[in-house]
Image: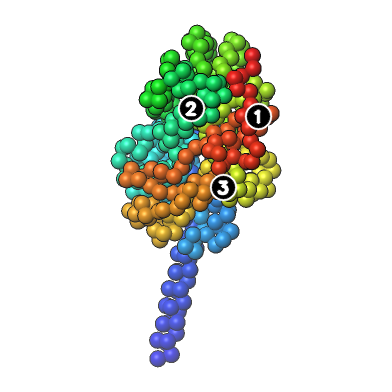
Amino acid sequence: MKKLLKFATVLIAGVISLSAVHAQQAIKIGAINPYSGPLALSGSEVTRGYELAVEAVNGKGGILGRKVELIKGDAGNPQQGISIVSKLVEQDKVDLFMGTYTSAVSNTASDSAARYNKIYWETHALSADLTERGLSNFIRSGPSAVHFAETSVKGALEIIAPKLNKKSDQLKVWIEHEDSAYGTSIAQAQKKLFETAGVKVLGVGSHAFRSIDLTDSILRARAAAPDIWVSTGYVPDSILLLRTMRDQGFVPPAILMQGTGDSKEFLDAMGPFMDGIFVVGYPNADLAPSFAPGAAAFMDAYRKKFGAEPIAPQSLEAYAMAHVLFDVITVAGGTDMKKMIAATLAMDKPVSTYPNGFGAKFDAKMQNTRANPNITQWQKGRSVTIYPNNAASAGTTIINIPRAK
């Protein structure tokens, strides 16, 4: 009897020990972004936001009693997106994926993740096609290309046109975009929305983001003489466009950029030329506290960890959308793909729930409908939120429109 009791005690202790070990197993998230190459700075800035979110949730005990572990996967092109997913699943044993700075990588990486029945939680990639594929594992918590296009057109009509003393049917725009799915989908939506509003679209130009000479793109736009030059791109091509614009003496009354243009790289490259430029982008950290109650805490955490100001607003976006993911995992009771899909569809969080002012309500295509970009304007070396009105700080005004020659 004593031997039996001893055996039972050992068995129970073993079960408890195994349960404890299981409870402590980390939830592993593969963070796919470019960490090398021309977009490495931007990819790393996105991941900084993820890292801060992971530290915040782990500081509160993790999710479901489990710590969260972030494992980086470097992917700067579509083929790398496929291979890094296989590596992260087979070698690193990740439970799900989160990314991505570029739409082309998100497209292939999420498709590869679907073969492993792993959720791909998209926070940044904008291409409209990503949620049109009907991919069983793909969820976009951030905005889409359509959201960016809608906000840019609203900004042109509600903010810029009045400053130019023009009605919509008097307004003339030139649309420029980098030629991947990201830039193309925004430009196509913009053209349709502008024309529906009665705005004259003088032309649509496209270019490769790796271009080393964009003189022709600027000369074509200059010849058209638009009231607003509207441009979507990545950091390298957008800076090159602005430099060429300055060198060629092209001074449109207003410049409206999408997706990039609000980071320190632009100020370092262009200096005072940036003053007055509008940018449709992810919410900036200068948001009104009532609109984004967690932005100030994010800023404090960023400065403490990295000893600097955020390089770009992509880090706040990453931080906030990671928190949406953590809420979904909690409701789903883990990282099972089908349970996470169901938990995502059940979400109903109002705007201003998350640190960047977003809410969470997903449509049937797994697109968050409460994730809208904001508009900032460069003013004396700072990118200042000006739209929507309830997101802007008190006393914010518009400067340098029309642009000084």
Q: Please indicate, yes or no, whether residue 365 appears anywhere in the rendered image.
A: yes
Q: Position of residue 183 (x, y in %)?
A: 44, 26
Identify the residue shown where x is 40% and y is 86%. Answer: 4
In the picture, measured across the screen, residue 384 lies left or right of residue 103, that is: right
Vertical position of residue 332 compared to residue 48: above or below: below
Q: Which residue bears the numbered disc 3?
A: 292
Local secondary structure at mark 2:
helix
Its colouring scheme is rainbow
**For the view shown, which residue lies furthest in the bottom direction?**
1
Eye-nearest disc, 3 or 2: 2
- Identify which residue is drawn at 59% across, 36% down: 385
Q: Whole-percent x and y of residue 258?
A: 50, 29
Crowd class of label 2 (few under 14; some 14 to 19; many from 20; radius 10 Å) = some
Return the x and y of residue 319 as percentages of the image width and height.
54, 46
Front label number (2 vs 1): 2
Residue 157's disc number:
2
Secondary structure under tag 3 reads loop
Return the residue nearer the eye: 351 or 32: 351
| Mark seen at residue 379 | 1
Residue 169 or residue 87, whichever sits in front: 169
Query: Is 271 on the left or on the right of 391, as rendered?
Result: right
Mark 2 is on which residue type? Leu
Quick check: marks 3 and 2 in contact, CB under 8 Å? Answer: no
| On-image quarter of the N terminus | bottom left
Q: Which label number is shown at residue 260?
A: none
Query: Is disc 1 surrounded by few (<14), some (14 to 19) or many (20+) residues within 10 Å?
Result: some
Amino acid type at image mark 3? Ala
Instruction: Tell me which numbered mark, 3 or 1, is placed earlier along the sequence.
Output: 3
Q: Which numbered disc flags the more N-terminal residue, 3 or 2?
A: 2
